[in-house]
Image (spheres, rainbow, N blue to C red):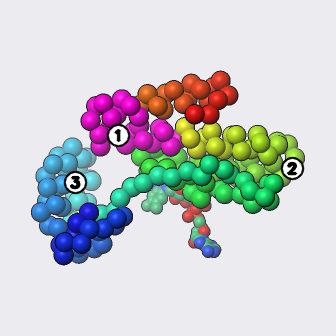
Amino acid sequence: MTDIDGVQHQRTVPFGKVQPQVWQKQIQNHAINFAAPIKEVLSKIESPFVTAIADCISPQASFYDGKLFLVGDALALFRPHVAQSINQAALHCLLLERYLKGEITLSAYEEEVLSFAHTTLLWSREVGSEYLHSIAGHLYHKMRHRVARRAQRWGVRL
Ligand SMILES: Cc1cc2nc3c(=O)[nH]c(=O)nc-3n(C[C@H](O)[C@H](O)[C@H](O)COP(=O)(O)OP(=O)(O)OC[C@H]3O[C@@H](n4cnc5c(N)ncnc54)[C@H](O)[C@@H]3O)c2cc1C
């Protein structure tokens, strides 16, 4: 995350600031595994930027006794590998309607959305770690996700 001027960035190295040798190394080391259309796209990037991928989750989905809600990405932001964020936003819409109609309680709403958020967050870390970490790191994330899924079936959120 250090740019051509020696400045270290926390989240994004902007266009025109990525060190050419860093970009070339990425292309050489990783592009070999990509499918042909992705390789073509990569070869056409003249001015790359780099942005760090992060995730976060709120410990709570509703506030002020069910009058204020965090929904979609505002509740939980997943790493993109599992492409589940629209699913999450849709789940919130469906469940909020049921809560507003009085079909489910506030605590049932909280439990359902936080359970989905926690297991999906762990899943996205598991998938991401397959590419980023050592086998030990990947196994750690995989185990955490599997245990959380199992616990979810027993009604426990880890
Ligand atoms: C490049 C990219 C690719 C993606 N691909 C996928 C994918 O394949 N599958 C998938 O499931 N998800 C994908 N996502 C994630 C998905 O787009 C988001 O998870 C989803 O849009 C979240 O919906 P949201 O309503 O929570 O937030 P948003 O869609 O971000 O909506 C928030 C809205 O609030 C508005 N806003 C912000 N501040 C204010 C303010 N102060 N006042 C008023 N309005 C404000 C914003 O303008 C925005 O319209 C992708 C995201 C990106 C960026």
Location of the C terminus by quadrant is top right
Percent of width and height locating residue 124: 45, 42
Q: Which residue lies under the disc numbered 1?
A: 129
Report x, y in % for residue 68.
Answer: 75, 60
Magenta highlight range: 120-141
Label 1: how many residues lie within 10 Å, few (<14), some (14-19) or many (20+)?
A: some
**In the image, what residue type sits under mark 1?**
Ser
Residue found 19% across the figure and 72% down from its top: 6
Rendered view: 105 above or below 23: above
The quarter of the picture where residue 13 lies is bottom left
The residue drawn where x is 36% and y is 29% is: 139
- The numbered mark, 1 or 2, whose residue comes first in the sequence reads 2
Instruction: List x then y, in percent, for residue 34.
Output: 24, 47
Rate crowding at label 2 as few (under 14), some (14 to 19) or many (20 or more) other CA atoms within 10 Å: few
The residue lying at 62 percent from left, 34 percent from top is 157
Residue 20 magenta-highlighted: no
* Mark 3 vs mark 2: in front: 2
For disc 3, the marked residue is 39
Asked if residue 145 is positioned above or below residue 28 in the image, the reply reads above
Task: Judge depth for marks 1 and 3 and give the one in front.
Answer: 1
Q: Tell which tag, 1 or 2, sits nearer the viewer.
A: 1
Regarding residue 47, the answer to whether it shows in the image is no
Q: Which residue is mark 2?
A: 101
Predominant secondary structure in magenta? helix
